[in-house]
Image (cartoon, coloured by chain):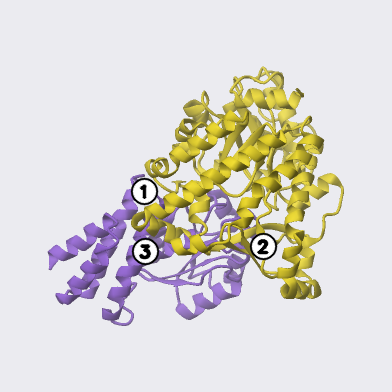
């Protein structure tokens, strides 16, 4: 059994698109614990993240890894007990109001799911009140705001204010990411972290939800 | 040959310009352009948001589109933005001419290549650059079926528009036409990045076919611009994002290298200088841009991690560096001192010996006209050769002026 789990990790790391879902199917057919299969996939995704951080893999490779995870999770999900996906906690994600870019946000969502988080992806052009509503109903302790364009930075500020006004700021940690974000902007907006890329986003949310 | 032309040509040939560092214009926003011209633009944005006119557009967008009104507005805008660049005193202007959008209704536009966009209004009643939402070409069959007639018409239209622009402004400013989009963006955006990433693994031949089509199209555009008499061109193609290239440089070379070399050879054969524009952290791509034969590279975003001094050291003898003035803070809401300091440090990093043009890294509607003017003033202060003279000390921009606009 361990052999096939190692193969899943390795095939994910090597971005073998056709092979990973097949291996997941084989593992489940051999009565593998779905949670261990998920761990094997997550280990592969973490390895992809490391290769990206080292400059071996590029953005397009993260997208392929995300597609692999999507297909593998579609095979795995029916075998998982309700609530067992996303053991590391829940993250609310969305692109802020007025901005409809979703590549970066989707990549973060794929990477987080692949690394064991439950992701509530609100999509693009998300109004502050929708972020607040999702944080309230899910009880999530972390939110990621994606923004590409400088003119939409005001929507990030409005969302941060809405979270504060809703009385959620004490328990919710906020990260932002996207082309126009900088550490200086993060300080000005009073958020907890600024992510440069999807791999750093995983590290940020791991630190948010482990503390 | 005007002073501007001499400056820009010298910079593009990595020679020291006769007097000062040239300034390169990338303005593409209605509000800024018409504020400079002191005219009111056609209130396109207002028409798209006012309840009554919006309802009319929703019902009749197809009919309005067939009248050619939207494309004619893009022709007019290219002319007006060049006039605005001349009035501001820029040496070179990257003049985007983009008659590519068909409006389906007041909210959605589709371009001639197969992208869908949300219509964006800038809050001052002007249309801003539409926001890409998704691709409409999912398969090779979609690509074959796509109506390409507007793509075929584009070179003729560009030739007509730039004949007039060059005739009226070409003596005073170095004009570099551009259009949307380059080969990389025109292969991935019409299908979406996820589909493109999968197609790279499952159907690379399809991607190669699309690249060959747009390579030939770009070469025709170069012919059309050269025939209009302009001296340069910009190849616009975002190949990087803030952490680096979107594809491995080796894969970019495999897919796009020969096509880009054909494009630059065509440009040079026609007597045109050609500058590549890419947003993002292009540091790992700079040697490749030089290998592909480009004369210059624009954007060089500091917020994406581009270090101008390092870029100068890496490719300063092979590429003219253009840009590096930040548009997330410096040209949006920075103080006069900060703008002067940004210009001074950029010139110090890349201006020695020539081969650098000061420019914003891009254009968007939050950029302040006042700060663009400060940028130009700062070039007058710090950009005269020989660099490092008495005026080139750490920023002391004279009387403080309260941030405006």
Residue appearing at x 27%, y 56% in the figure:
A13
N-terminal label among 1 and 3: 1
Tell whether B36 sits left or right of B129: right
Q: Chain of mark 3?
A: A
Spot the purple chain and give its letter.
Answer: A
Which image quarter holds the N terminus of chain B?
top right
Q: CA distance from mark 1 to mark 3?
A: 19 Å
Location of residue B377 by image quarter: top right
Q: Quadrant of residue B251?
A: top left
Question: Which residue is labeled 3 in the image?
Answer: A67
Residue at the limit of the structure toward the bottom, as seen here = A82
Q: Position of residue A83 (x, y in %)?
A: 33, 80
- Give the CA separation, mark 3 to mark 2: 32 Å
Q: Residue at x 27, y 63 (%)?
A: A18
Which chain is drawn using yellow?
B
Q: Circle 2 sits on which residue?
A: B102
Where is residue A130? Give x, y as percent. Answer: 56, 75
Q: Is residue B289 above or below residue A41?
A: above
- In the visual, does A179 lie left or right of A72? right
Mark 3 falls on what kind of element? helix
Instruction: Determine if marks 3 and 2 fall on one subunit.
Output: no
Residue designated by label 1: A53
Q: Nearer the viewer, mark 2 or mark 1?
A: 2
């Amino acid at each position: 059994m361990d052999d096939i789990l190692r193969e899943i990790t390795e095939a994910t790391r090597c971005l073998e698109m056709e092979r990973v879902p097949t291996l997941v199917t084989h593992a489940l057919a051999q009565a593998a614990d779905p949670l261990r299969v998920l761990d094997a996939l997550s280990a592969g995704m973490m390895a992809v993240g490391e290769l990206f951080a080292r400059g071996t893999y590029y953005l397009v490779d993260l997208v392929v890894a995300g597609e692999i995870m999507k297909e593998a999770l579609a095979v795995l999900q029916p075998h998982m007990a309700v609530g067992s996906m996303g053991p590391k906690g829940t993250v609310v994600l969305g692109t802020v109001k007025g901005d409809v870019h979703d590549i970066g946000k989707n990549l973060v969502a794929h990477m987080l799911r692949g690394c064991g988080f439950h992701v509530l992806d609100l999509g693009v052009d998300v109004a502050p009140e929708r972020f607040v509503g999702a944080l309230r109903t899910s009880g999530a302790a972390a939110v990621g705001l994606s923004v590409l364009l400088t003119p939409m930075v005001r929507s990030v500020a409005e969302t941060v204010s809405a979270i504060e006004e809703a009385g959620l700021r004490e328990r919710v940690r906020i990260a932002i990411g996207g082309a126009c974000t900088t550490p200086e902007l993060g300080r000005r907006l009073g958020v907890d972290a600024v992510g440069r890329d999807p791999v750093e986003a995983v590290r940020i949310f791991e630190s948010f939800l482990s503390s | 040959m005007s002073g501007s032309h001499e400056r820009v040509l010298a910079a593009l040939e990595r020679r020291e310009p006769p007097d000062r560092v040239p300034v390169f214009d990338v303005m593409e926003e209605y509000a800024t352009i018409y504020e400079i011209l002191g005219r009111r633009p056609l209130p396109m944005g207002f028409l798209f948001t006012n309840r009554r006119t919006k309802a009319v557009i929703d019902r009749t967008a197809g009919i309005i589109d067939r009248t050619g009104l939207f494309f004619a507005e893009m022709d007019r805008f290219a002319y007006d933005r060049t006039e605005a660049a001349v009035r501001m005193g820029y040496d070179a202007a990257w003049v985007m001419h983009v008659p590519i959008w068909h409006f389906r209704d007041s909210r959605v536009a589709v371009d001639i290549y197969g992208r869908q966009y949300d219509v964006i209004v800038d809050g001052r009643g002007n249309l801003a650059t539409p926001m890409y939402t998704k691709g409409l070409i999912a398969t090779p069959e979609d690509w074959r079926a796509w109506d390409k007639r507007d793509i075929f018409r584009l070179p003729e239209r560009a030739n007509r528009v730039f004949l007039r622009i060059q005739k009226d402004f070409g003596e005073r400013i170095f004009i570099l036409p551009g259009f949307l989009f380059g080969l990389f963006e025109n292969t991935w955006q019409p299908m979406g990045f996820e589909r493109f990433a999968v197609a790279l693994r499952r159907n690379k031949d399809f991607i190669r076919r699309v690249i060959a089509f747009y390579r030939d199209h770009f070469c025709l555009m170069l012919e059309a611009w050269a025939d209009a008499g302009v001296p340069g061109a910009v190849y616009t193609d975002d190949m990087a994002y803030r952490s680096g290239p979107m594809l491995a440089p080796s894969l970019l070379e495999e897919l796009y290298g020969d096509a880009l070399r054909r494009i630059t050879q065509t440009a040079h054969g026609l007597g045109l200088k050609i500058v590549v524009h890419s947003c993002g952290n292009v540091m790992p791509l700079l040697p490749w841009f030089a290998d592909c034969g480009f004369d210059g590279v624009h954007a060089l975003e500091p917020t994406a991690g581009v270090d101008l001094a390092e870029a100068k050291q890496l490719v300063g003898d092979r590429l003219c560096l253009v840009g590096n003035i930040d548009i997330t803070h410096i040209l949006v809401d920075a103080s006069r001192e900060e703008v002067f300091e940004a210009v001074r440090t950029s010139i110090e990093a890349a201006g020695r010996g020539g081969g650098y043009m000061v420019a914003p890294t891009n254009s968007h509607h939050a950029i302040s006209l006042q700060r663009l003017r400060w940028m130009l003033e700062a070039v007058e202060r710090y950009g005269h050769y020989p660099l490092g003279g008495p005026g080139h000390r750490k920023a002391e921009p004279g009387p403080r002026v309260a941030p405006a606009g």
